[in-house]
Image (cartoon, rainbow, N blue to C red):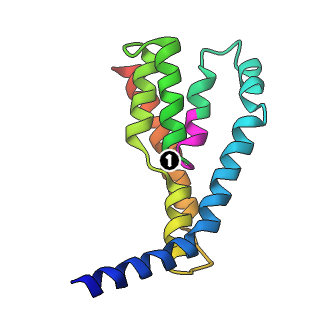
Amino acid sequence: AYDAFLEGVDESFKTVKNIFPNILAIIFAINVFINSGIMEILEKALSNVNIVPEIIMQCFLKPISWSSSLLLMSKIFEIHGVDSTTGMLSTLIQGGSDTTIYIVALYFSSIKMKKTGHTMWVGILTDIATFLICALFINFF
């Protein structure tokens, strides 16, 4: 049993070594996206429309990072409240979609597959459809 354990640990280090560059790139991209000032631009652009900029930002972040999206959902709860329409929409977005870009990058890099084909586009289109359905669900119910 101990030899099997050591073999598993050795294999896990190889897996981490293979996927680490992709995870680092995703973390870097998230930090650039968050610190780019896009939130302020969204707030100015959506000031006349009845759309909360944090929801749009959560829709951008959710396919990339679950934890960043969760952090933004917590911020939405603090600003608008848990039982508000915005809070419920944020909850639906958080629970209704998945981290498509992260999953595709992680899984495809772990098997050393360079071409994702249509996987990424289908996943992103599915996320967009999920966000729209969540918004429609909140507006009708």
Count every numbered label the image shows and give the total. 1
- Outermost residue to the front: 2
Residue 118: image location, x then y, percent: 56, 68
Of residues 9 and 55, the one drawn nearer to the viewer in this rendering: 9
Residue 52 drawn above or below residue 102: above
Residue 134 occupies quadrant: top left
Q: Secondary structure at mark 1?
A: helix
Residue drawn 71% across the image and 28% down it: 39
The type of residue carrying mark 1 is Asp
Which region shows up in magenta? 58-64
- Outermost residue to the left: 1
Residue 103 drawn above or below residue 138: below
Crowdedness of circle 1 by 10 Å Cα count: few (<14), some, many (20+)? many
Residue drawn 25% across the image and 82% down it: 2
Q: Quadrant of the N terminus?
A: bottom left
Residue drawn 43% across the image and 81% down it: 10
Q: Quadrant of the C terminus?
A: top left
Residue 94 occupies quadrant: top left
Queried whether the magenta region covers residue 93, the answer comes back as no
Residue 104: image location, x then y, percent: 52, 64
Residue 90: image location, x then y, percent: 46, 28
Residue 133: image location, x then y, percent: 43, 36
Residue drawn 45% across the image and 42% down it: 130
Residue on which disc 1 sits: 127
